[in-house]
Image: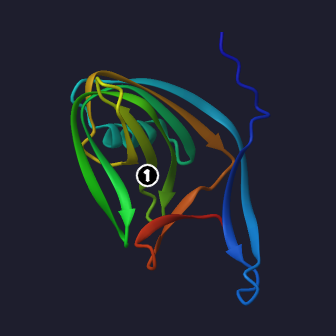
Amino acid sequence: MIYLRNAFRLFVSQYGSIDSTKNEKVVVLLEGHCGKLFFSRLQEDDDVADSVKKKARESGVKAGVFMLIGALKCAELGCYKHGEYVTTRLDGPLEVASCMGNIAIDEKGETIVHAHIVVSNENGQAYGGHLMRGCNVGPTAELVVLEVAGVDLQRRYDEKTKLKLLDLG
């Protein structure tokens, strides 16, 4: 039996400058509570990033966290460098040792998934990075999405980083 208590709190932090001359920082927090919990099985050849986004959208999740385990035929991992992602492709079979992330919306209301993934090959060598499109499910993958209610979790494009960053203000 699974019990989830409503006492769970999600804290998302972002540093904002108070006095740039002194480099003082303040932590901005958003607090929410557990909403619905969704379990889903991804099918062979499904793209993980696209599937998480689709499942969140279909379930009406606009703020949440997720985790995924399973196997992949191939993986596309990203590493942020100078305003863009440098990607590495790995061919499988691969085990998903860990995949977790968050779900938010952007200023246009589009679902945004930000996730990192660690995969391992048959020799136990592990590789990790930003979850990119191109991570295709092998036999199966299992997705758990936890909706965070009472939070307006948004991402906005940041010109300096060229990323959609959490806007907690």
In-front residue for pair 37/89 = 89
Q: Is residue 119 left or right of residue 169?
A: left
Quarter occupied by residue 108: bottom left
Q: Amino acid at mark 1?
A: Thr
Q: Residue lying at the far top in this picture: please name it.
A: 1
Colour setup of the view: rainbow
In-front residue for pair 169/161 = 161
As drawn, 33 above or below 2:
below
Residue 68, how many percent across, how many down? 45, 30
Count the marks: 1
- Residue depicted at x 59% and y 55%: 153
Which residue corresponds to mark 1? 111
As drawn, 64 above or below 107:
above
Residue 4, how many percent across, how many down? 70, 24
In-front residue for pair 52/59 = 52
Q: Give the quadrant of the N terminus.
A: top right
- Residue depicted at x 41% and y 40%: 117
As drawn, 110 above or below 115:
below
Quarter occupied by residue 42: top left
Residue 15, how many percent across, how many down? 68, 68
Q: Is residue 55 left or right of residue 25?
A: left
Q: Give the quadrant of the C terminus.
A: bottom right
For disc 1, the neighbor class at 10 Å (few under 14, some 14 to 19, many from 20) is many
Residue 107 in sight? no
- As helix, strand or loop, the secondary structure at mark 1 comes to strand
Q: Is residue 90 left or right of residue 38?
A: left
